Image (cartoon, helix red, strand yellow):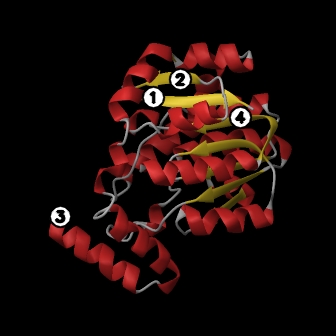
């Protein structure tokens, strides 16, 4: 699909969804007036993150007192099935990230309520749900429709049917989804951010999510090296964060 076709298809998709008009307006501003916003402070934060980075294994051990090796063994069949489903999916989206970090964050927090932004295939959703299922917990997810790809039916594709009863999926932009989620449940044990990567988008969401994280809960944000939003957020609240290097990218994680 050419870039022009993709943009046109996305625009038409927005026009068909009046409930997404607010996000369309934000997208237009982000891609015109605030075009450089996505990478604000990137160089500064990349150096900062690189200097603090540890492996996923080290982070889980340090923060949660757990070893990560059992995860791949205990859920080998589930993960293998999920990988095959991703391979067979006709629409390409984001692949698995630091699944152990998410799973053991939920275990550490004895999580019953988790919120995430960004779903795609649902790898992160799967990791959280595997833990939540032990406690009859609920995962609340915010994910924008894939307007250019005809991929809506594949969002969460790798999540097994038996886990979906514990999952509430809100198909709007974060600024519309999160208030709906917080109206349904106000306090969360684990937060995972992996959606709007712009500086302004992150800063807004981080502040909102942090308000709803319980004391002792776990905050996780992917791709923190894209700009300085996460670093600035941590400095604003005097947060001592751990940084995880995973497949060439950086993840921020801390216990509130």
In this picture, residue 84 sits left or right of residue 116: left
Q: Earlier in the sequence, mark 2 or mark 1?
A: 2
Q: Earlier in the sequence, mark 2 or mark 4?
A: 4
Residue in the picture at 67% in, 34% down: 237
Q: Identify residue for label 1.
A: 250
Q: Identify residue for label 3.
A: 3
Residue in the picture at 67% in, 49% down: 209
**Dot 4: what SS?**
strand
**Dot 2: what SS?**
strand
Determine contact: label 2, label 4, CB under 8 Å: no
Please tell me how crowded label 1 is: few (under 14), some (14-19), or many (20+) other residues with Cα within 10 Å: many
- Picture quadrant of residue 1: bottom left
Residue 7 drawn at (x, y percent): 24, 70
Real-space CA distance between mark 2 and mark 1, rounded to the nearest whole angstrom = 6 Å
Residue 84 drawn at (x, y percent): 43, 44
Q: Identify residue for label 4.
A: 218
Residue 247 drawn at (x, y percent): 39, 26
- Between residues 195 and 61, which one lies in front from this camera angle? 195
Please tell me how crowded label 2 is: few (under 14), some (14-19), or many (20+) other residues with Cα within 10 Å: many
């Amino acid at each position: 699909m050419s870039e022009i076709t993709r943009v046109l298809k996305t625009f038409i998709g927005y026009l068909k969804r009046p409930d997404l008009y607010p996000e369309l307006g934000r997208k237009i501003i982000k891609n015109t007036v605030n075009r450089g916003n996505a990478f604000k402070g990137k160089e500064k934060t990349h150096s900062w993150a690189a200097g603090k980075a540890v492996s996923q294994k080290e982070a889980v051990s340090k923060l949660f007192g757990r070893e990560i090796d059992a995860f791949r063994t205990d859920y080998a069949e589930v993960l293998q099935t999920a990988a095959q489903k991703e391979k067979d999916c006709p629409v390409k989206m984001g692949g698995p990230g630091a699944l152990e970090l998410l799973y053991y964050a939920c275990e550490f927090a004895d999580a019953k309520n988790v919120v995430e932004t960004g779903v795609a295939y649902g790898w992160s959703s799967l990791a959280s749900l595997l833990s939540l299922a032990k406690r009859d917990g609920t995962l609340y997810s915010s994910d924008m429709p894939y307007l250019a790809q005809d991929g809506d039916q594949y969002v969460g594709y790798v999540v097994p049917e038996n886990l979906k009863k514990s999952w509430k999926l809100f198909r709007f932009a974060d600024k519309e989804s999160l208030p709906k989620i917080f109206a349904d449940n106000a306090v969360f044990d684990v937060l995972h951010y992996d959606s709007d990567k712009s500086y302004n988008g992150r800063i807004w969401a981080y502040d909102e999510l942090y308000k709803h994280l319980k004391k002792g809960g776990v905050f996780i944000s992917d791709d923190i090296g894209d700009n300085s939003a996460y670093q600035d957020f941590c400095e604003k609240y005097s947060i001592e964060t751990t940084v995880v290097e995973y497949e060439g990218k950086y993840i921020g994680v801390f216990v509130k």
